[in-house]
Structures are given as structure tokens and as C-alpha cells.
Amino acid sequence: MEKISYLNLPNCVRLTNGEVEVIVTTDVGPRILHYAFAGGENILGLHPDVKVETALGEFKPHGGHRLWIAPENMPNSYAPDNSPIEYAFDNTKNSIRLVQPVENNTKTQKEMTVILSETGSGVLLKHKITNCGKKEIELAAWALTIVRGGGEAFVPNEPFAAYGSETLLPVRNLTCWSYTDLSDSRWKFDENFIRLRVDENRLEPQKIGVLNKQGWMAYRAENLEFIKRFDYTENASYPDMNSNVELYTAGDFIEIETLAPLVKLAPGDSTEHIERWELKTVK
């Protein structure tokens, strides 16, 4: 681990096992800003100039990976997180724990623990949201990763099976927003995948959600493939008409997102959502 300046943020930390490197910031967030093979190109997308004005102040996504509360809400989901955060190292696990101050409006506290594998490209991410208020709340942990433009996202379909007496019931949902246009050329639907291609010349947004029982989604840009793995909980209720993964793009901006089940948190209770990252080189 080493402290560095990155993206004009002076208090960042770089973790590496010699094969891959991860950079987090302690100036804002929690945020992961960089994930790459050691010395290689960042698979995460950075948008330091983007900002959203809300009733709670200015929200800046910065780029990279963040933790939000679902279902999406304005302004609560966009509560500014521009203040320094607490952090702690665990040198035995090559990990760092990032803790946000309690949000005044939602009375929740977000945490992210980043654990780098001893070898290989694996990263384990633990996302935690705690109810610090005095009332029960219902929410889901929502892990959003902005990846760099120029590539294509993949969500695996459920295994194909021919029509018959054993295949009368549906196996997954497809959630659309009011601005979703499935005839948009950035979408492609084939037997194995739902695909979303980034096109910097198409500024109008596109988004879908699905219930993904396969437990992974991926993004490929040039010779890099970024894979996010997660657990699927049978019979759980997920946000956004039962979506546990979502894809969003507008111009060269694209997010690949996973969501945990909806839970009711009593005061002091927490919910946790885990992602496992992997980076590959592809032809």
C-alpha cells in the first residue's frame, strides 16, 4: 500500500499485489477510482467534471465505483459525499475499510471494504449500509461501477430450454424505464447475452434491469474484460421490479450495477452486499 495523489485528490491509497492495482480515495466517497493490471490501463471510467445539482447540494460521481441506496430517489440517493472519510488498513489481508460520515438526510452510514487477493486479479468488495436513525427504514444496497467508454456490457441470459411441459413458467424479468428504447442500436439481444454497447455520439440515456440468477455480469473494452460476480438470493424481493443487475449508458458514460435484496433495517441494523471482481486480458 502507498499513499498517492490521483485525479486531483491528494489523499488516495494504492493497493497492489504485483499483478493488479486498486486505487481508492479518502477525500470523498467511498470511491474506488482505479482497477487495472499493474502499470496498465484503468478499466474504470472517470468523470471528474460531472455534477448533479440537488436540494441537498452538489453531487459529484467522480467516476469509478460507489455505493448507493436503492430504490433511486431524488434527492436522497444523490446526497453529496464530498467530505473526507475515515479509513483503516488490514495489512495482513492487503485491504482497506472506508467509512462515510452519517448522512444527515437519510440517517444512514455507508462503508466499503476492499480486499485484494494475494495473487491474481481478484478483488473482494464488502458494501455495508447501517441505519443510524431512530426509525425503521427499507432499502437495498446498490453497487454502481462506472467503466471506461468504448466497450460493451454483457448480462448472461438464463440457460435456454426448448418449449415443453417443463418450461411453461418464465425464468426472468426485464425492467424498462420510460426512456428505455429497445430498438436503439446500442442494444443487442441474442441467445446467450443481453448486450449494451457504448456510443459516445448517442447522448440519449438507455437503461434496463433484469433478475440475473447466473451471478455475474461483464464489460469488455479493447483487450480487457472486467467481471463482477455476486450472490443471487432465491425468493428475495429486489428493487426496481425485482432487478438485481442494471445497465445504464449515455454518451461515453456507462454503469454496470448490482443490487442486493430489499431489507427492513431497525435502528442500528445493517445490510451487506458483496461483489467479487476479476480482470482478464482477451483477444
Image (cartoon, rainbow, N blue to C red):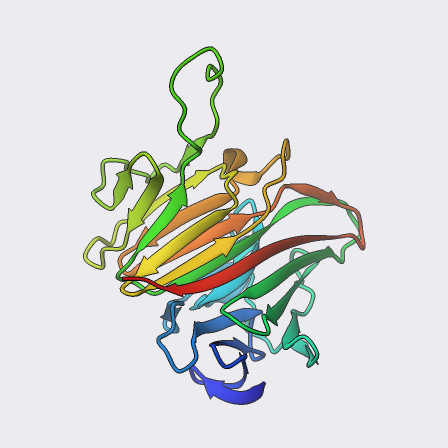
Pick the quarter of the image with the N terminus. bottom right
Q: Nearer the viewer, residue 102 or 241?
A: 241
Q: Position of residue 98 (x, y in %)?
A: 64, 72
Q: In which quarter of the image is residue 209?
A: top left
Residue 73 seen: no
**Is 241 rendered above or below residue 147?**
above
Pick the quarter of the image with the C terminus. bottom left
Q: Quadrant of residue 275?
A: bottom right
Q: In the visual, does 60 lie left or right of 233?
A: left
Q: Which of 48 and 12 is in front in this view?
A: 12
Q: Which residue lies furthest to the top in this view?
A: 165
Residue drawn at (30%, 63%) of the image: 149
Residue drawn at (78%, 47%) of the image: 135
Residue 143 seen: yes
Q: In the visual, does 10 lie left or right of 194?
A: right
**Is 209 rendered above or below residue 272?**
above
Q: Position of residue 255 (x, y in %)?
A: 40, 56
Q: Where is residue 258 in the image (x, y as percent from the top left)?
A: 51, 50
Q: Position of residue 253 (x, y in %)?
A: 33, 60
Q: Which of 117 and 189 is in front in this view?
A: 117
